[in-house]
Image: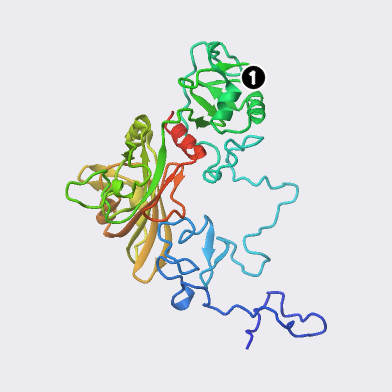
């Protein structure tokens, strides 16, 4: 028997003189039919609506900012709407005379024109480069298009260097230069005749570092639980090199460490300068973790961790604290911090009385783990590596 429609849904008034549903129409969805749900319509721990494990994945377990779930576990209207019968979920009334710009207040506008590396699969949602330390101006070079001190008569035309690096076609690269979107050694270049040495020039497009050294590689490894963050282990435990198949001949560094019980994102590279900067505390590279602990969690724990927790090696604090999900006996929390101290997340949660049950690192700087499967290694896209290099002033 078809369930009666709710009041205010717009389905109480019969159409066509009170005719019933058309033959062959789709039946109404029954409450609790979504896969991976437990009692009361709540999603099961660690499962998305398809019933697949979602802990540590962007597509599962992490509602969008300002979004809440309804009784059946489906994403509902934006938080704070208060009413379920005001049209489509998440739609607000536009203010007269103020057209929407589509950007959040204070957000940087994207440069006009084609994006660098526009055909890449990864990194197209990273937005503008944030917190990039401004490089020092080259001696004699000035902003505004001056090429004094930058032109190398024996070098390669700038638009050709950009095209060979995969930024875009040469014609599009010429348009980017003319639009003032390209920097060489900290100076904005707008002249098309500039020649540079690809081996020494530091080039940015829209703030994204263009890597012209093809010998440098950058990878993301989704470390499973039980794997040691070393290339070799004298005790015979599983380590990173066991997952390197095509890259066994390359000498790679792992950027930072994850303890044996922690899962998630680990960067691998042969760029020693980048590895040093990413781990140096002065650059304050943010790292995002999903933390599962025993619940319920008392109010004020997040504020306490933001203010600072006194540990044996000093005061440590998180940059942000957000409750992601709560099920009977378990709480899922997202924390962001830039500290690189050993086992810092576990020690902080131990200090507030909530020992960690499961810990997954999902993001380092602008690089996200996404839906990459555990134990797999993928190469960073040029947009991703460019954002990462620019974040630490390279």
Q: In the drawing, does residue 161 fall left or right of residue 279?
A: right
Q: Position of residue 239 (x, y in %)?
A: 27, 49
Q: Position of residue 111 (x, y in %)?
A: 63, 34
Give the quadrant of the C terminus. Answer: top left
Residue ID for mark 1: 192
As drawn, 89 above or below 98: below
As drawn, 283 above or below 147: below
Closer to us: 178 or 136 = 178
Q: For the point 20% across and 45% down, which residue is it?
A: 312
Q: For the point 48% across and 12% down, which residue is it?
A: 139
Q: In the drawing, does residue 381 fall left or right of residue 91?
A: left
Q: In the drawing, does residue 275 fall left or right of residue 134?
A: left
As drawn, 103 above or below 13: above
As drawn, 297 above or below 15: above
Q: Give the SS element for disc 1.
A: loop
Q: Position of residue 7 (x, y in %)?
A: 67, 78
């Amino acid at each position: 028997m078809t369930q009666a429609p709710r009041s205010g849904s717009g389905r109480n008034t019969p159409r066509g003189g009170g005719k019933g549903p058309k033959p062959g129409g789709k039946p109404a969805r029954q409450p609790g039919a979504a896969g991976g749900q437990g009692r009361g319509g709540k999603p099961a721990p660690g499962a998305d609506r398809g019933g697949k494990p979602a802990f540590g994945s962007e597509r599962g377990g992490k509602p969008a900012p300002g979004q809440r779930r309804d009784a059946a576990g489906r994403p509902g209207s934006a938080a704070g709407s208060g009413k379920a019968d005001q049209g489509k979920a998440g739609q607000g009334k536009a203010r007269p005379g103020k057209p929407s710009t589509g950007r959040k207040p204070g957000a940087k506008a994207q440069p006009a024109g084609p994006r660098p590396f526009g055909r890449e699969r990864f990194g197209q949602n990273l937005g503008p480069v944030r917190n990039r330390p401004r490089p020092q101006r080259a001696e004699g070079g000035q902003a505004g298009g001056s090429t004094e001190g930058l032109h190398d008569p024996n070098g390669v035309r700038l638009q050709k260097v950009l095209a060979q690096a995969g930024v875009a076609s040469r014609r599009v690269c010429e348009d980017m230069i003319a639009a003032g979107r390209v920097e060489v050694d900290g100076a904005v270049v707008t002249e098309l005749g500039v020649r540079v040495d690809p081996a020494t020039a530091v080039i940015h497009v829209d703030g994204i570092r263009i890597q012209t050294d093809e010998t440098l590689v950058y990878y993301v490894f989704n470390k499973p639980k039980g794997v040691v963050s070393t290339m070799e282990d004298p005790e015979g435990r599983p380590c990173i090199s066991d997952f390197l198949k095509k890259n066994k001949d390359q000498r790679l560094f792992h950027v930072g460490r994850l303890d044996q019980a922690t899962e998630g994102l680990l960067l691998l590279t042969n760029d020693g300068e980048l590895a040093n900067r990413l781990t140096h505390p002065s650059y304050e590279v943010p790292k995002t973790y999903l933390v599962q602990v025993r619940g319920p969690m008392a109010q004020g724990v997040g504020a306490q961790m933001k203010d600072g927790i006194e540990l044996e090696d000093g005061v440590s604090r998180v940059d942000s604290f957000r409750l992601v999900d709560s099920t009977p006996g378990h709480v899922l929390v997202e924390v962001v911090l830039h500290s690189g101290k050993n086992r810092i997340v576990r020690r902080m949660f131990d200090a507030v009385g909530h020992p960690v049950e499961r810990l997954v690192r999902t993001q380092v700087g602008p690089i996200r783990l996404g839906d990459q499967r555990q134990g797999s290694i993928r190469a960073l896209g040029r947009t991703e590596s460019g954002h990462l290099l620019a974040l630490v002033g390279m």
